[in-house]
Image (cartoon, rainbow, N blue to C red):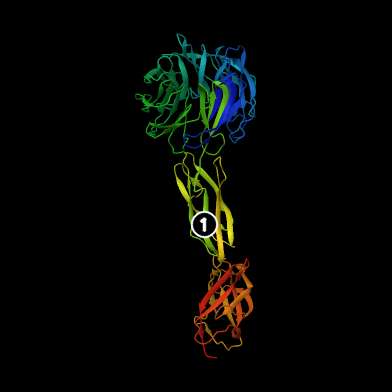
Amino acid sequence: MAVANFANNSVSIFLGYGEGMFNLRKDYPTAGPSPVSLAIGDFNGDGNPDLAVPNSNLNGSAGPGTVSILLSKGDGTLQPHVDYVTGVDPLSLAAGDFNGDGKPDLAVVNFQDNTVSILLGNGDGTFQTHVDFPVGFLPRTIATGDFNRDGKLDIAVAHGNFLTSFGITVLLGNGDGTFRSPVEYATPGPPLSIKAAEVNNDGKLDLLIVNFSQDTVSVLLGNGDGTFQKSVTYPTGGISAQALTVGDFNTDGKLDLAVVGAFGGAVLLGNGDGTFLPPNFFDAEGFSLATGDFDSDGKLDLVVPGSLLFGNGDGTFRKEPGPNAGAAFAGSLQTADLDRDGSTDIVAANQIGTVSIFLNRPFIALFPSMVSFAKQPVGTTSAAQTVALYNPGSPLLRITSIVASGDFTQTSTCGSDVAGGAGCAVSITFAPTAGGTRTGKLTITDNSPSSPQVIGLTGTGTGLAFISVAIDIKPGDPINSINPGSKGNIPVAVLSSRTFDAVARIDQTSLTFGRTGDESSLAFCNTEDVNGDGLLDLVCNFNTQSTGFVSGDTVGILKGKTVDGIPVRGTDSVRIVPK
């Protein structure tokens, strides 16, 4: 979210931690003195959403105003503002391609000289000198669209005082950055907010306005030729409506209206034919609002200063605390993916002279914060302990990696994404490679602001136990018959597995084999896949007469160590035959 702040000439950015938690704020200065509106567009063609903020003279200063351009770095931060001259007292603006060259331009409403300034964009983030076009008395807000369906962008401006002189001015575009003569349309009251949208599904853009003193909204259906029908008015229920946005809030494929004012908010559900149902109220008040899917659930949400309203998909909302730039009034709210992470962020122009940005970031909760294991024999593996991971926010938590270090290993059910309100489990085991205290870390890297998260791991290795290995005495001989008096050798294969590479792990020189396993009988070793599983096994030959076997023995025992000193032990059946 970005907010323009009226009094201290800056822009603020807020970094959010999920549902209702756009809590980290970043402010950016503008040229001042009183930004109350903003527009978003890619003004330099780098794929990042940039900001344009008109610097209103509502504090009483006279003369031409300016518009501040704040180019985005693509990570939710902005470059310092660069300013361009406009008409007198620029109050609101819109971005669009008014001359058809594929580069965003600006249309700036100038309150005190009753004009719209067009600043053609150069496509590199800079703009040409403004050219002004007359509109109605005291213009306030602006909407753009192709009202006559000629492929050229047009302008509609809501204007007037709060007494007798008010209406809508329509300027049809010539496609070269100039406009035809203005055409006026009457409104039932002073229009404060204006939007262009197709609300009756006829392929023709319509105009929607909030009538300040009437506490109503009006719909002017478009004829598709740049003209509009007489306004039809709908009451907003006594909320003193001042701001308007459009969206499908009950997911029926028909556009609805959301309005907010000094005494609350309301949704007027659309019938799809340009008419609307009576207002359904929601608990939020303010002087600006915007819409976006902040929790990525496919249902449109609303934001007003200080409140987030998460859509239920049926035209009702659930209220949560929202971003607050500290301003008495937020002049304008806009939404965009400012850091290109796939989540909807918020930008606000505040009437305290700043613009604020609130990035929509997830939050991660982990329990416990430290994992300790009981004493564990060296060379053995403990039972698993679990770390619970939970995403209590709304945005998707994207996990890059989960890594355990030291004598600890992990598996998880998390995958690459954890949805808002969902959780997963990380299972950790401890396999000490030496005695004494052993430590490690569980490190989780993700897209939350607190990444990476680190959980301490500790355990104690005790007494050298052994690793049990699978052996095959006399591979290929199912009986394993041994004549203790033979002058030959007995082949013994130490079998590899997917988790134990016998060739790489076993210290061949440490191996002993015989009736107790302590007999120093090793002759030589080689490698061979004796069981056809695709893994090389370690095959060692032991001097028969040195193995100590006697009549009646039924088990042969192999002992040794791994290359890092961990004892190993394996057994297989034998059959002793007469000498």
- In the rendered structure, the answer to whether residue 45 lies left or right of residue 230 reads right
- In the rendered structure, the answer to whether residue 230 lies left or right of residue 503 reads left
Determine which quarter of the picture holds residue 6: top right
Q: Residue furthest left?
A: 278
Q: Which residue shows up at 58% across the image and 28% down it?
A: 27
Q: Secondary structure at mark 1?
A: strand
Find residue 481 and report its horizontal and vertical position in percent.
Answer: 52, 84
Q: Residue furthest bottom?
A: 579
Q: Is residue 175 visible?
A: no
Find residue 563 and report its horizontal and vertical position in percent.
Answer: 63, 67
Q: Is residue 377 above or below residue 293?
A: below
Residue identified by numbered label 1: 373
Residue type at mark 1: give it. Answer: Phe
Residue nearer the viewer, 189 or 539: 539
Q: Is residue 553 above or below residue 105?
A: below
Determine which quarter of the picture holds residue 516: bottom right
Mark 1 nearby-residue class (10 Å; few <14, some 14–19, many ≥20): some
Residue nearer the viewer, 40 or 573: 573
Q: Is residue 264 above or below residue 512?
A: above
Find residue 250 and report its horizontal and vertical position in percent.
Answer: 38, 32
Which quadrant, please, contains the C terminus?
Answer: bottom right
Q: Which residue shows up at 63% across the image and 76% down it?
A: 525
- In the rendered structure, the answer to whether residue 306 lies left or right of residue 101 reads left
Find residue 425 and report its horizontal and vertical position in percent.
Answer: 47, 51
